[in-house]
Image: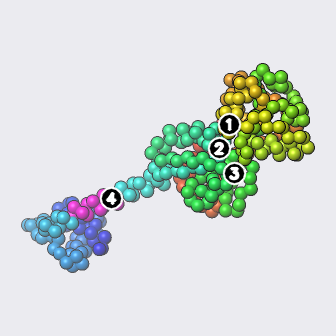
Amino acid sequence: MNLHALRLFHTVAEKGNVTRAAEELKISQPAVTVQIKKLEKELGVTLLGTKGRGILLTPVGIQLAKQAKRLFSLESEIEIYIEQLKNGEVGKLRIVATYLPANFLIPNWIGKYKKKFPEVELELMTTNSQKAMSQLMNYEADIAFIGGRREFNELINSTQLFEDEMLFVVNKNHKFASKNIPLSQIVKEPFVFREKGSSSREKLLSLCETHNVQRPSVSLKINGLNEAIRTVIEGYGVTFVSSLEANEYIKRQELAIVNVNEMNLKNPISICTRHKDILSTNVQDFIKIVKSSINR
């Protein structure tokens, strides 16, 4: 079907007059008449009759005019939607992140973003770094936030947002609370370890290896960050965590930092997108909010 001719017919039906339709469309009256005749021939039906100086829609013309109105109304809605999408006002933003940014950073950024763009549907998925990269590469996510140091392949654009400090923390009344202690001494204390494979556990073991210090013994192994921190708050042992994980408890003076002399370990937080992709307005707006929050 010739959609251009259908649009002319739709305008004529709306205006009830070929002349007014031609003025609306800014084309000549004969051109409108010719196109509608071609549409009638294409469809094999009569759409318009004459009524004095005006036009009369045939029964088929009345039904086609109703369908045409629905079609062009939908077209208008699509155009409005696309314009809103370009402006970042609607659409869907899929974020994938590792545990640390997902729990301690992104909720704040999401809150700021949703206040500004309430109509955008937002989805946050939490997983490990390997799966996060896979979801990003397979177009299952639009943007990824990775906590921890890792190598990114050439298909990924990664930008380090900042480095989070790693800390040894104890109960506020612990003998080492707020004191300067060598690594060789702190590792002799009872340790509350996270589960095997956790980032903080691997970093601690790597730190001991780097400084040729005996690994701490696993006095208590707990699956879960909050459980490990609560155990230390209650007065048992030492644990090794990211400052993002511990800051809230330190501010409330439920935990205290042990200043370990050889300690200078940072945990980078990176933002990742697909290489050579044109970033959607939604992604660009979210990144602006992230960078604005970090730079304050």
Q: Position of residue 150 (x, y in %)?
A: 74, 53
Q: Position of residue 161 (x, y in %)?
A: 69, 45
In the rendered image, which residue does mark 1 sit on? 225
Task: State if disc 1 and disc 2 touch (CB < 8 Å).
Answer: yes
Prevalent SS, magenta region = helix
Residue type of the residue flagged with mark 3 = Thr
Examine the image and state in which quarter residue 83 appears. bottom left
In the rendered image, which residue does mark 3 sit on? 159
- Crowding at dot 2, Cα within 10 Å, few <14 / some 14-19 / many 20+, comes out as some
| Rendered residue at 48%/54% (across/down) | 86
Q: Position of residue 120 (x, y in %)?
A: 47, 47
Task: State if disc 1 and disc 3 touch (CB < 8 Å).
Answer: no
| Identity of the residue furthest to the left in this view | 52
Q: CA distance from mark 3 to mark 1?
A: 26 Å
Give the camera-side residue of 118 and 31: 118
Q: Nearer the viewer, mark 3 or mark 1?
A: 1
| Identity of the residue furthest to the right in this view | 212
Q: CA distance from mark 4 to mark 1?
A: 51 Å
Instruction: State the extent of the magenta-drawn residues as a range.
Output: 65-75
Does residue 198 sit above or below 31 in this rendering?
above
Q: Position of residue 241 (x, y in %)?
A: 74, 37
Residue type of the residue flagged with mark 1 = Leu
In the rendered image, which residue does mark 2 sit on? 99
Which quadrant of the figure contains the N terminus?
bottom left
Does residue 152 sit above or below 293 in this rendering?
below
